Image (cartoon, rainbow, N blue to C red):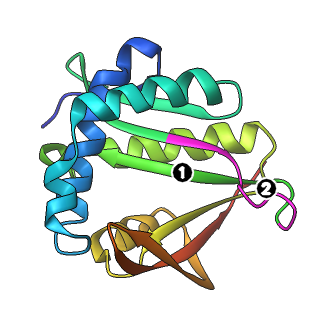
């Protein structure tokens, strides 16, 4: 794929496309890591409704970006203040970054990551943190290539009756 990737701020009309990216992304990335029945039960329609609610509620606090290629949304990222601001003042958190599975390794994720880091630094964040499943080797490689390193914190994440380990990563930003 040689089409240029364009990253822009998400608008409410993007919720359906973002939901499709997110659901397809979950099904691909978490296959074998979370219960298959849970992934099969995910619905683009239900997720789009959740995206609309999140977008309306958290729009001023969080930044949602979409990646487009040839006029179609093929990726999504969301960041904002770190959820545990009491211990990491001045740090942001990358809450989500997904690309459609058929657009992996084509520059979509990198474009979203670069724009997220640039915007977060411009907003004054000193670092970005994120959580990634310990056994999601592909995502961990992506984040490590993007300058993130594990900071030694591991937490359990409970999904669909299963507990999986999440690792916290951090990337220092230059302002």
**Residue 146 at x, y percent in the picture:** 47, 62
Residue at image coords 85%, 68%: 87
Camera-nearest residue between 162 and 26? 162
Camera-nearest residue between 1 and 128? 128
Question: Would you name the residue on which mark 2 appears?
Answer: 126
Is residue 84 within the magenta segment? yes
Q: Quadrant of residue 148?
A: bottom right
Q: Magenta segment, which residues?
A: 78-87
Camera-nearest residue between 90 and 175? 90
Residue at image coords 26%, 38%: 21
Q: Nearer the viewer, mark 1 or mark 2?
A: 1
The local crowd at label 2, few if under 14, some if 14 to 19, many if 20 or more residues have their Cα within 10 Å, is some
Q: Quadrant of residue 100?
A: top left
The disc, 1 or 2, on the residue closer to the chain's N-terminal end is 1
Work out how far the residue at label 1 is from the one at label 2, CA to CA, in angstroms: 16 Å
Q: Is residue 15 left or right of residue 154?
A: left
Secondary structure under tag 1 reads: strand
**Residue 14 at x, y percent in the picture:** 36, 19
Q: Is residue 166 left or right of residue 24?
A: right
Question: Would you name the residue on which mark 1 appears?
Answer: 95
């Amino acid at each position: 794929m040689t089409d240029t990737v364009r990253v822009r701020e998400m608008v409410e009309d993007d919720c359906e496309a973002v939901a499709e990216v997110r659901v397809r992304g979950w099904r691909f990335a978490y296959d074998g890591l979370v219960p298959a029945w849970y992934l099969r039960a995910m619905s683009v329609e239900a997720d789009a409704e959740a995206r609309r609610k999140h977008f309306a509620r958290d729009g001023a606090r969080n930044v949602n970006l979409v990646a487009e290629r040839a006029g179609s949304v093929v990726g999504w990222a969301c960041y904002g203040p770190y959820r545990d601001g009491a211990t990491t003042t001045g740090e942001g958190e990358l809450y989500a970054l997904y690309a459609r599975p058929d657009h992996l390794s084509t520059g979509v994720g990198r474009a979203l990551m670069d724009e997220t880091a640039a915007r977060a630094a411009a907003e004054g964040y000193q670092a970005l943190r994120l959580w990634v499943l310990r056994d999601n080797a592909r995502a961990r490689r992506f984040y490590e290539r993007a300058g993130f390193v594990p900071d030694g914190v591991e937490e359990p994440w409970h999904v669909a009756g299963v507990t999986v380990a999440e690792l916290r990563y951090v990337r220092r930003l230059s302002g």
